[in-house]
Image (cartoon, grey):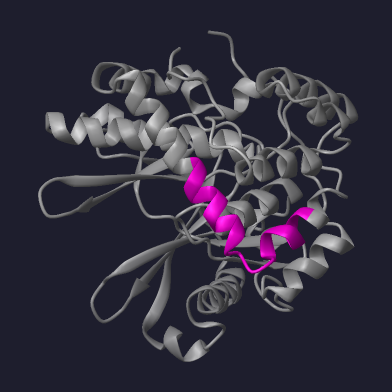
Amino acid sequence: MPHLISQKKGNYPISDYLRSYLTRYGRIWSESIRYRDLSRFANAIPVYDEKGKDTLWSTVLYAENDRREIHEQLLTAYTILKADGDTSISKYLYIDRVDQCIHGNTLPFRIRVVNRINDNFDYFYVKKIDANRIYGLEIEHILSPNRINYFIHAQTIVEEHIIGIPADAFLREEIPVTNFDQVRLAKEFVKFNERCFISLLGDMHSGNFVIELTRDFEKWHFRMHPIDFDQQSHHWRKEVYLPECFEQNALFVSLVNRNLAVENVVQYQKEERSLVANRVRVSHGRFNQLMEVMKEDIISSDDYVKRLSQQLAEHYKEKKFESCATMGEIVYTSITRLLDTSLPASFPRVVV
């Protein structure tokens, strides 16, 4: 299968309208670390996993004067994420490591924070500003089962770590699961696939989402969380928004085909659509406020908007997609359909 995304996406700025929305919901902070501050490193050392494989992350090293200042700012950023800026929680914390991802065009930083008393550690991320990413984070926060914690300062996004096993590592490590666990994992992939397509969150190959495992009364419960939102509502090709279409997810698709009947797939798709529709209804107007901003914003090219709207009009057999002039209007049309119909958005059976 050819690559679904052949070109790197540029970053789109945050409009004043979007910034006003983010301010209303406490996403903007006047002081914190800036991405450009972390870029002042003097050296970098590749990070390898326990098997000696390059992780595509490098630990960055700073001159001593820069290190002290940067670490202090990073601790302040962590307190904003975790305690609404209460710096008293940083008394027993220190910055253990700053890594930069050298793969792709966004080059995010990953920061490891350690508690001096018990050696417990946590991560958070510092990234460049990008409107697509912000819309993806907000849509995920409002319409998915996952709460998203992040804030913005100037041209920088600071994000909380999303807990879970990277899906590609989950497949590579062949984590043992029973036949019943496989059914639950297949069910979750169907629901995840449906949710991504409804909200037009793209590029969800196995390297861009994680799997959270929770033990319940009898077996494991699985939940899939996206961790990369750069391709929110940007690309023109509808397959980009279907995790089932990425070759990296072929094992998940095979799991679905082996363990679920067509009737099960349709049932789980309808369940997910109902859940998203209910989240729209109980969002207390936040969804509509976000959509009013997104419908006015430019986060993709006119050509991409036109091509995607035509594909979705054909996919859904609904001409109203053809009148969409922005990606925000397409997303709004896709999601508000849920209030009127329970028909599955993606294919009736997940196939590659």
Residue 212 located left or right of residue 305: left
Extreme-front residue of the structure: 340
Q: Nearer the viewer, residue 14 or 348?
A: 348
Image vertical order of residue 25 relative to residue 306, above or below: below
Residue 301 located left or right of residue 157: right
- In the rendering, at what x and y percent does residue 49 appear? 31, 39
- In the rendering, at what x and y percent does residue 42 appear? 60, 54
Main structural element of the magenta stretch: helix, strand or loop?
Answer: helix
Q: At 24% from the left edge and 47% from the top edge, which residue is drawn? A: 221
Q: What segment carries the magenta color?
A: 273-291
Q: At 30% from the left edge and 20% from the top edge, which residue is drawn? A: 261
Extreme-top residue of the structure: 1
- In the rendering, at what x and y percent does residue 168 appear? 37, 31
Image vertical order of residue 145 relative to residue 238, above or below: below
Residue 278 falls inside the magenta stretch: yes
Q: Can residue 176 be seen in this view?
A: no
Q: Can residue 347 be seen in this view?
A: yes
Residue 176 falls inside the magenta stretch: no
Image quadrant of residue 187?
top left
Q: At 71% from the left edge and 41% from the top edge, which residue is drawn? A: 331
Q: Which of 198 and 119 is in front in this view?
A: 198
